[in-house]
Amino acid sequence: MPDKTALGTRMKENYEQRTRYKLMRRCPVIIRLDGKAFHTYTRGLDKPFDEGLIEDMMETTRFLCEQIMGVKCGYTQSDEISLLITDFDKLETEAWFDYNLQKMCSIAASIATAKFNQLRMERSCHDGGGETQFPCISQGAVGGFPLAYFDARVFQIPEKEEVVNYFIWRQRDAEKNSVAMLAQSLYSHNELYKKNGSDMQEMCFQKGQNWNDLHFSKKRGSFVIKNTYVDGNLYDGDQVIWVNDKDTKYAIWNEDKGEYIDVPEAVIRNRWEANWCPIFSKDRESILKLF
């Protein structure tokens, strides 16, 4: 009878472990997720911008931020999501799955795929079918519901300034596509031939559509960060929350008095939210301060 232990050891050590690859520790990590063939998946949705799709992508990004260890922020535009991850908050900070590349890619893509499809099914039922492409599904019709899929790639950017430049790159892509989509909803392909972004913005304006008036999520994407609330009030980040290890009371630094003010039994909660989206090229600090 074969030695099952020896067989397992041989399979793992001779084959499985030799294909493992781990990222370098203490170096910023980017995970970018992209929807697979979303040009087909989104047929029938509202043009140029589908509110439900934007909301579901934002919520999927928020969920990824909650589930993945070390996430500093999430950014989503169109059918893609970018996450910034670090493992150097403290000396003892651990890396997500020890930065095992295969696990990071597969699990991130799985989380996004599962959550996004859940949101789409919920939205279908909430909309009651109506004129959307997805009718409200019954338990027996789940098998016919169109599914979305995401792929993921993971890589590292060693310089913090280059991390900011990465997000600038993706946001510029979002802005370019946003202007083009708005223009394409108003003009024919021939009318837009060889027109640049500025030309298309002006043409949209002539039709009474000002691109600059669009919601930030439609213009430049959604930026998901972790906000802190103290007793239900948004913590502005200019003060310092301090924990007294001796009696575990919370205190907040008061600039006017120049001292810590105790907040007895304060309730401090963190929430991942997308309340705004900076223009990264003009507000580099919005990324840099997360390190």
Image (tube, helix red, strand yellow):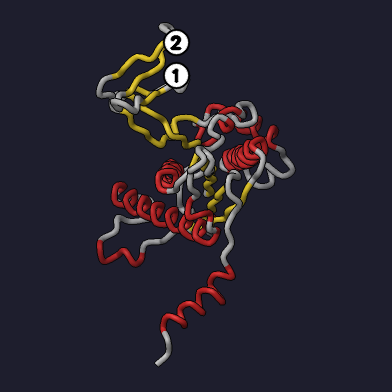
Above or below 201: residue 185: below
User: In front: 174, or 87?
Assistant: 87
CB contact under 8 Å: marks 2 and 1: yes
Residue extending furthest front?
246
**Percent x, y of residue 100:** 53, 58
- For the image, the number of numbered tags is 2
Q: Secondary structure at mark 1?
A: loop
Question: Is residue 91 visible in this depiction of the protein?
Answer: yes
Q: Residues within 10 Å of mark 1 (few under 14, many from 20)?
A: few
Q: Which residue is mark 2?
A: 255
Residue at the spot 61% in from the left edge and 51% down from the top edge: 24
The kind of residue on which mark 1 rests is Gln
Residue extending furthest bottom?
1
Q: Is residue 233 left or right of residue 15?
A: left
Residue at the spot 41% in from the left edge and 52% down from the top edge: 116
Q: Is residue 75 left or right of residue 248?
A: right
Q: Residues within 10 Å of mark 2 (few under 14, many from 20)?
A: few
Residue at the spot 62% in from the left edge and 48% down from the top edge: 156
**Percent x, y of residue 25:** 58, 49
**Percent x, y of residue 221:** 53, 38
Above or below 156: residue 145: below
Q: Secondary structure at mark 2?
A: loop
**Percent x, y of residue 74:** 50, 41
User: In front: 15, or 216?
Assistant: 15
Q: Which residue is mark 1?
A: 239
Snapshot quadrant of residue 20? bottom right
Give the CA distance from mark 2 to mark 1. Answer: 8 Å
Residue at the spot 53% in from the left edge and 27% down from the top edge: 213
Residue 77 shows which numbered tag? Answer: none
The kind of residue on which mark 2 rests is Glu
